[in-house]
Image (cartoon, rainbow, N blue to C red):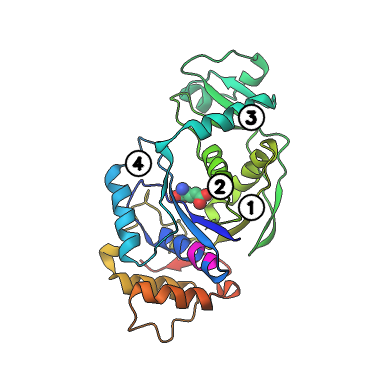
Amino acid sequence: MYQGRFAPTPSGRLHLGSLLAAACAYMRAKQQGGLCFLRLEDLDKPRCREEYKQGILEDLDRLGLHFDGEPLIQTEDLSYYQNSIDNLIATGKTFVCACTRRQIRERPCTCRERGLKYRRGFAIKLDCEEAERTFTDERLGSIYVPLLPESLTLRRSDNIISYNLACVTDDIRQGITEVVRGSDLISSTPLQIYIYKLLGAKPPKFLHLPLITSKDGSKLSKQNHAMAVLDSHSPRDAVLYVLTLLNQDISGCSALTPAEIWPLAAKRFDLNALPKGDIELDA
Ligand code: GLU
């Protein structure tokens, strides 16, 4: 059965780019009679706040996007991530890194050659030199990522679990068959596929979506203060707006509630109609 997910980081309220990802993940799953789960990726504690978690849950509810089951909240159980790290350590492809942030900025890390023993305050990294640079995207076809880092942090020196490790661990444990998300994560995908391989798991399919950019070409995100979508739109207007940006058929939807729009939009969902490039907004 098709199992998808929407996995926002609660470092801000739900903005238009997140709504676009949520909408596509949801419609893609429901069009195929599948499930779509919600996961709050809150491991980076300094960036994530309780009020944003609640805000995202409330906004999704007001937008009529009801995901299957209970949301998975990453900080509720870290044992899954530790287990993945232990399994990766057992492959012999990891190493301990003692570099400070400043050292990493100033010179290349040579910790792999040093064969350090783990101590508190050290990071654990994965050697990624054998990662494949090409993968197939369900929308964009074959993708080649020319520049991959030599290594990937699995657990930071402050003990925070990295996004890539957590994402793969959770996509495996939630049985995700297709990952639908923004194209900003294309460059992470080969690294994630490599982690699947080392963990002996079958990677899901990947479908990367157009990004919403402002006129100057930058991605709209929480970092550059993209607004909470429900601050500037009613729930119905926000839903119709995002479907319009995705070039989807919204005929007959203007008098429906958001919760009534989604089943219809999912039935009609046309992947080929999505804009080929980024979606540029005036503001
Ligand atoms: N948590 C990530 C974000 O909010 C998305 C991760 C993913 O979909 O793989 O950008």
Question: Which residue position holds label 2?
Answer: 171
Question: Which residue position holds label 4?
Answer: 48
Name which residue type carries label 1: Pro
Range of residues picked out in magenta:
25-29
Q: Nearer the viewer, mark 4 or mark 2?
A: 2
Instruction: State whether residue 275 appears in this view.
Output: no
Instruction: Mark 3: give few (<14), some (14-19) or many (20+) Cα within 10 Å.
Output: some
In the picture, residue 153 is in which quadrant? top right
Distance, label 2 to label 1, CA atoms, is: 8 Å
Residue 204: mark in rendering: 1
Label 2's element? helix
In the picture, residue 73 is in which quadrant? top left
Which comes before the other along the chain, label 1 or label 4? 4
Distance, label 4 to label 2, CA atoms, is: 20 Å
Is 246 located above or below residue 205 in the figure? below
Distance, label 4 to label 3, CA atoms, is: 27 Å
The residue lying toward the viewer, choosing from 152 and 56, is 56
Question: Which residue position holds label 3?
Answer: 88
Label 4's element? loop
Residue at left offset 52%, top offset 39% = 166
Distance, label 3 to label 2, CA atoms, is: 16 Å
Which comes before the other along the chain, label 4 or label 2? 4
* Quadrant for the N terminus in the image: bottom right
